[in-house]
Amino acid sequence: MLNKFFKLKSANTTVQRELIAGLTTFMTMSYIVFVNPDILSNAGMPRDALITATCLAAAFASILMGLYANYPIGLATSMTSNSFFAFVIVKSMGLSWQEGLAAVFIVGILFIIITVGKVRELIMDAIPASLKMGIPAGIGIFLMFIGLQNAGIVVSNPHTLVTYGDLTNPATLLSIFGLLLMIILYIKKVTGAILISIAVVTLIGIPLNITEMPNEIVSLPPSIAPVFFKMDFSNILNPDFLMAVFTLLFMAVFDTIGTLMGVAQRAGLIDKNGNMERAKKAFMADAAGSTAGSIFGVSTVGAYIESITGVESGGRTGLTAVTIGILFLLAMFFAPIILIVPSAATAPALIFVGILMFSVVENITFKDWTELTPAVIAIVMTPLTYNIAMGIELSILAYVIIKIGTGKFKDVSATMLVLSIIFILKEIFT
């Protein structure tokens, strides 16, 4: 039944491989169960209720992605949107968190309309081949950067922004060991290399007091009632509300394009023309998941780039995503166990996957600077701005300006030109 529904054989995968992939992705993105409530609580939202809301929204969106689009992608509250929600929409713009949820709901509906129409296809098809390589490579560096930070290998510095951390710290050394173990197992083609490394590092961390053992195993999830269906639409004509909707929509569309493109590349879900298979269904699942997330009581839900850890563990179908969703449901009851996996165990997975994603640069045309430069901008600016959507924006602007400036007008599609104008207006008025 599973083989027939998810087309496991044609995807050259098995139930066991998909389950391992789902568990691997869940472990690398499960931090959202605890981080998201911490961030959104800054908007005045009740933290306990947010734990349950985060799990339910992630479970619904991930299972929908698996059943409807048959993609091995996990979804949860976006780490860019939750910070924007709490610190900009609520604290800076002065909207209530209930009004913020209304904005998220409207964004989800608009995203669905964009997906049903031709806008999403126009954007995807208009992105040139060089950027379709540069954007995933930039996301790869972004993942490596996040992983290096989580491992303590790279830390902040007031003079140089970043520098190397304390390489004698036991947690940092354990992360380095985990990364090397992961790479060796991968080279030797050991199934579940990422998951094995995470498990080994977690176990080694126990005697080193890096892995904290829980006081309990099972706990009942808090009530979702304080945040469930609390959208407030009474202020939708407020200029700040409209600006919040526009910014959230921009972030949702381009974060999703970048993330889905990156995962599809690694999962082999790209056709001979460089386009994503079942792209419309994947975008629809993402949009519907975000809409449902606002009802559950969280900010914009989106595809997680950490899903590539599952893809590299063999995940190729929606069974991986369904597994992720089920694990989020279980997480509501087994949250204490999830807490024991330290960042020293999951950080190496992000670094490892980042290396794999960066390998697509070999397909970039290095001899044509009108193609190379925008791709390099995507690669560099995505991690340096800490924003996938901004990396896409800057690379598209560079592509259009350089092509027009060198007289290659025919290479610039009408869609790319319109996007550039929208980006410029966005920067002027936001």
Image: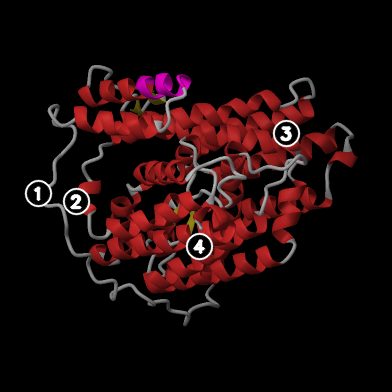
Residue identifier under label 1: 215
**Start and end of the magenta stretch?**
180-188
Mark 1 or 3: in front is 1
Residue identifier under label 3: 130
Image-based side of 368 in relation to 18, left or right: right
Specify which label sits upstream in the sequence, 2 or 3: 3
Residue identifier under label 4: 64
Q: CA distance from mark 4 to mark 1?
A: 34 Å
Q: Residue drawn 78% across and 29% down?
A: 370
* x and y, in percent, of residue 91 in the image: 37, 61
Q: CA distance from mark 2 to mark 3?
A: 45 Å
* x and y, in percent, of residue 149 in the image: 36, 31
Mark 2 or 3: in front is 2
SS of the residue under disc 3: helix
* x and y, in percent, of residue 244 in the image: 52, 64
Amino acid residing under circle 3: Ser
Q: Which mark is residue 237?
A: none
Specify which label sits upstream in the sequence, 1 or 2: 1
Q: Residue furthest front?
A: 1
